[in-house]
Image (tube, grey):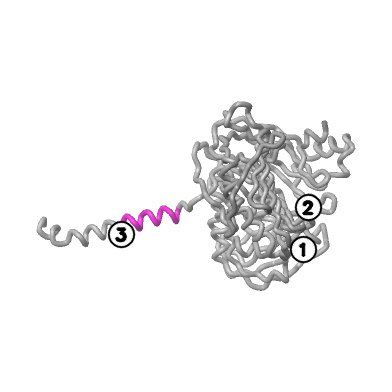
């Protein structure tokens, strides 16, 4: 026996290695990797997370998950043990669609019926994205001429684990498109909906646009995170030398600011009191991009900043200024800060210059906050408060977001949920508006 082992030890060892490899591969397939711990759908209490560099297809994923029951009752999901958005992407990118057909346009009531489609799951973007972005994120090749922008992906769950259609919705003129799909499997998506928490929501048409409302008071957890600070000198070197034409970077103090200069065209202003940076790159000529191209171009600009991308997601886009805001999210909810911490704003070159605004601070490691929760009133209470303050007519949007509050002298921040209203084109804290 020993002699046989000696003669065949290489074959035996190879067999053992192959078996171990198969076991590990099976574990990976059964428990798919979940990136962006807690920032994007994890409710665990671990104090570490995987740091990842988000690709364009990650940055532009939907952030909100809403499940609709058989009676059109809707629940916004968060904290599921499996990331529903990533699970849905893993499923959808294997599907092949055909027959993109417009079935509804211009009718508010009909559009609401699809937003509240019985027995369905809806993945929603914070703002519209071009069809090219949808195609990139979900590995598809749909015609951008038929549907140029997408706000919601509605997946029916009323026919078992096999479905034959999904719907793409565009808030622009209340358009609904049906996509045929050959026996797509939604078993993994169903599984990802289990566990976690939810809050009751409903869709309404407000000021000519659909919004998510909260018919009952809600309770949401507070979060704590350690923060990290980027070295402004490092950022200046990255921004000043992110092209093939390198230049010497100089700096000088000016009225409490540090001004970095790279040649005659690049300028970075660091506000040490606020921890924010403003960057301008004078190109001298205007760049033109189509709506289908501009999101990819702005992402490339973002990736060249040297800012950590692991917690950032696409949030809003201004067609007028060709400017985009990338924002940190926690559990699918956007994070806001008075100084703009956790956000990056990038404006394309329209007048001969590219412009960036961002901060040195980003969220890193989650920390315990004693399971504290914050109670929020219903939407009706919020709207009554705005009406009494004389500001309801100027509101064009509503969402729950997390307020980033820095603890003085600490590298830990507290994230507290509250309502944010779109007021005169900007997202404002509800309490600030009514007070």
The residue that appears at 81% across and 36% down in the rendered structure is 433
Q: Position of residue 372 (x, y in %)?
A: 61, 30
Which region shows up in magenta?
A: 18-30
Task: Give the SS element for disc 2.
Answer: strand
Residue tagged by mark 2? 210
The residue nearer to you, when weighing 179 against 140, is 140
Position of 327 compared to 102: left or right?
left
Q: Is residue 117 above or below residue 312?
A: below
Disc 3 crowd rating (10 Å Cα; few below 14, some 14-19, many 20+) is few
* Badge 2 or badge 3: first in the primary sequence: 3
The residue nearer to you, when weighing 273 against 172, is 273
The residue that appears at 73% across and 70% down in the rendered structure is 146
Alpha carbon distance from label 2 to label 3:
54 Å
Position of 422 compared to 123: left or right?
right
Displayed quadrant of residue 361: top right
Numbered tag placed on residue 175 in the rendering: 1
Displayed quadrant of residue 116: bottom right
Question: Split into 4 quadrants, where in the image is the N terminus?
Answer: bottom left
Alpha carbon distance from label 2 to label 1:
12 Å
The residue that appears at 13% across and 58% down in the rendered structure is 6
The residue nearer to you, when weighing 342 against 215, is 342
Position of 87 compared to 422: left or right?
left
Residue tagged by mark 3? 18
* Residue 71 visible at all: no
Q: Position of residue 363 (x, y in %)?
A: 58, 39
């Amino acid at each position: 026996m020993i002699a046989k082992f000696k003669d065949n030890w290489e074959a035996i060892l190879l067999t053992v290695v192959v078996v171990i490899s198969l076991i590990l591969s099976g574990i990976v397939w059964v428990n798919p990797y979940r990136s962006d711990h807690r920032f994007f759908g994890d409710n665990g209490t671990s104090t570490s997370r995987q740091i990842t560099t988000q690709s364009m297809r990650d940055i532009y994923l939907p952030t909100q998950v809403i499940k609709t029951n058989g009676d059109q009752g809707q629940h916004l999901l968060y904290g599921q043990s499996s990331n529903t958005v990533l699970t849905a992407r893993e499923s959808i990118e294997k599907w092949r669609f055909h027959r993109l057909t417009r079935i509804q346009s211009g009718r508010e009531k009909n559009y609401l019926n699809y937003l509240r489609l019985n027995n369905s799951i809806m993945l929603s973007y914070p703002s519209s994205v071009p069809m090219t972005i949808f195609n990139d994120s979900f590995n598809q090749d749909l015609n951008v001429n038929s549907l140029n922008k997408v706000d919601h992906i509605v997946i029916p769950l009323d026919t078992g684990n096999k479905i034959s259609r999904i719907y793409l919705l565009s808030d622009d003129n209340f358009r609904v498109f049906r996509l045929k799909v050959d026996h797509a499997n939604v078993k993994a998506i169903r599984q990802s909906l289990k566990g976690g928490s939810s809050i009751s929501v409903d869709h309404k048409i407000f000021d000519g646009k659909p919004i998510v409302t909260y018919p009952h008071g809600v309770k949401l957890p507070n979060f704590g995170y350690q923060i990290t600070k980027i070295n402004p000198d490092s950022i200046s070197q990255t921004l000043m030398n992110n092209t093939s034409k390198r230049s010497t970077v100089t700096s000088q103090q000016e009225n409490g600011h540090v001004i970095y200069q790279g040649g005659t065209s690049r300028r970075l202003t660091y506000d040490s009191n606020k921890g924010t940076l403003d960057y301008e790159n004078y190109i001298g000529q205007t760049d033109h991009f189509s709506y289908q191209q501009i999101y990819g171009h702005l992402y490339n600009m973002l990736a060249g900043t040297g800012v950590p991308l692991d917690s950032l997601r696409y949030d809003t886009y201004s067609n007028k200024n060709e400017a985009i805001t990338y924002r940190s999210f926690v559990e699918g909810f956007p994070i806001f800060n008075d100084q703009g911490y956790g956000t990056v704003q990038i404006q394309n070159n329209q007048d001969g210059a590219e412009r960036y605004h961002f901060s040195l601070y980003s969220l890193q490691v989650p920390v315990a906050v004693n399971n504290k929760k914050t109670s929020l009133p219903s939407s009706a209470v919020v709207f009554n408060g705005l009406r009494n303050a004389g500001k309801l007519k100027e509101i064009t949007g509503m969402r729950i977001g997390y307020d980033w509050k820095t603890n003085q002298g600490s590298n830990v921040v507290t994230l507290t949920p509250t309502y944010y209203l779109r007021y005169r084109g900007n997202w404002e804290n509800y309490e600030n508006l009514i007070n």
